[in-house]
Image: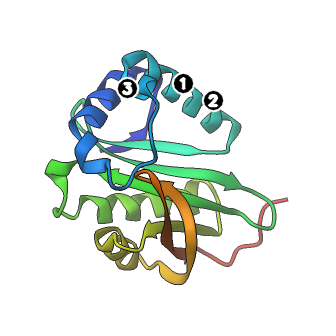
Amino acid sequence: MLRPFTVDDAPALLASYLRNREHLLPYDPARPDSFWTLEGQQARVADLVRQTQAGTTFPCGIFDGNRVIGTMTFNTIVRGPFCSTSLGYWVDVDETGKGLATSAVAAMLLIADQQLGLHRVDASTMTTNLVSQRVLVKNGFEKYGTARNYLHIAGRWGDSHLYQRILNDRTPPT
């Protein structure tokens, strides 16, 4: 099940991050020690909920019962003539290769279009992350460039491929 996070999800999210720490290491930025604590996750999720209420982000968990097995997040939602957002995601090490990321990205695209009323979703992947690139292409994203030294991941600046999906041609709300 894919649904927005609530503050009550912090313990399950922490357990998932701890379980996937090594799996995510090559793809994640450096995390402060507090990230790996319940208090840190509670504060983080509370902040994400505030940002969701402000309309600037939309973080969702992929749940198997009460267990978090991945996340899908629209970061930096921009309205007006841009009407766009950036998608970030990951899937539990034990769930990779099962089509879960592809299905969850498809569901998020429907949310972006039908619920959030956005025009465009972009995403970036490290140039070596072929699995994520396949997920994006399967969901109709087109590669539109490569950015040099785009993100500081795993302790170094790395190049990223840039992708976008145009959802519709509606006029942005005023």
10 Å neighbourhood of mark 1: few (<14), some, or many (≥20)? some
User: To which residue does mark 1 refer?
Assistant: 46
> In the image, residue 148 lies at what x, y percent?
57, 74
Contact (Cβ within 8 Å) of mark 3 with mark 2: no
Which amino acid type is shown beneath numbered disc 1?
Ala
* Crowding at mark 3 (Cα within 10 Å: few <14, some 14-19, many 20+): some
Q: On the rendered structure, is 18 left or right of 94?
A: right
- Tag 2 secondary structure: helix
Left/right placement of residue 78 relative to residue 134 reads right
Q: Give the residue number, with chain letter if any, for mark 3.
A: 9
- Residue 1 image offset from top left, x and y in percent: 29, 44
Rounded to the nearest whole Å, what is the CA distance between mark 3 and mark 2? 15 Å
Of pointers 3 and 2, the one earlier in the residue sequence: 3
Whether residues under marks 2 and 1 lie with C-beta atoms below 8 angstroms apart, the answer is yes
Residue 166 in view here: no
Residue lying at the far front of the rendered structure:
156
Q: Quadrant of residue 120?
A: bottom right
Residue 36: image x %, image y %?
A: 36, 26
Q: Mark 2 and mark 1: span between their CA atoms?
A: 6 Å
User: Considering the numbered disc 1 on the image, is that residue within a helix, a strand or a loop?
Assistant: helix
Please state which amino acid type lies under the numbered disc 2: Arg
Read off the residue under disc 2. 50
* Residue 167, percent from left and from top: 57, 73
